[in-house]
Image: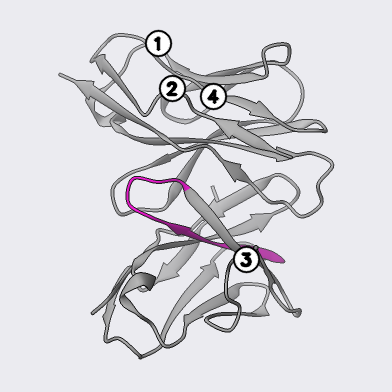
Amino acid sequence: AQSVAQPEDQVNVAEGNPLTVKCTYSVSGNPYLFWYVQYPNRGLQFLLKYITGDNLVKGSYGFEAEFNKSQTSFHLKKPSALVSDSALYFCAVRDGMDSSYKLIFGSGTRLLVRP
Amino acid sequence: GAVVSQHPSWVICKSGTSVKIECRSLDFQATTMFWYRQFPKQSLMLMATSNEGSKATYEQGVEKDKFLINHASLTLSTLTVTSAHPEDSSFYICSGQRGFTEAFFGQGTRLTVV
């Protein structure tokens, strides 16, 4: 069965500092991994994805994530946080062999960037 | 990225009435659309998978007679909450699948049943 774990309910960071939001996953086949961001009372916005290729994936708004197969992780990172990055972040996984396209979401991590 | 438009953004209805939520892919054709429910401060719970021209596939525990899903065209799926009750109050989000790897989400609908 597929699963995603986001071990931190909230991450606090000062503006200008680097940030990391953690995500680990479990799938039986090849993982397709995604990060989404959600602002209050809004849908999800796509940040980045890993399907295949380079382990370091660059996405929107300066975010990047590194796929680590041995650690089954896909942590989201940004070198310098902005106050406007404060939002709810979701990691999601899909089994590449699953033709249903279903995404399994983590529980979400609230990022709070203080000025 | 592609655009999925969800309407209405928020709705208040009386208990016992039905509410329809629309999800449209504006610039791509979505053979598959998904409907999620999100409780406060929680993750998204997949309710059903909607395939154009066929019956929706509901997740375990989701009442198909209560949450009616129609996917009549490649750009439109609708979710109707029938005989709504206060416990149906929630944030509902749809997504449209483009190609094999891309899913685009609507802005969500806040349903409040009074």
Q: Nearer the viewer, mark 3 or mark 2?
A: 3
Is there a contact, CB below 8 Å, between mark 4 and mark 2?
no
Q: Is there any visible trace of residue A106 in the rendered image?
A: yes
> What's the image's color scheme?
one colour
Q: Position of residue A31 (x, y in %)?
A: 74, 31
Q: Residue at x 41, y 28 (%)?
A: A61
Q: CA distance from mark 2 to mark 1?
A: 8 Å
Q: Determine the chain carrying the residue at label 4.
A: A
Labelled disc at residue B48: 3
The amino acid type, in three-letter code, at marker 4 is: Cys
Question: Going by the image, does B39 lie left or right of A83?
Answer: right
Q: Residue at x 69, y 74 (%)?
A: B56
Q: CA distance from mark 4 to mark 1?
A: 17 Å
Q: Determine the chain carrying the residue at label 3.
A: B
Q: Secondary structure at mark 3?
A: strand
User: Which residue extends farthest left?
Assistant: A115
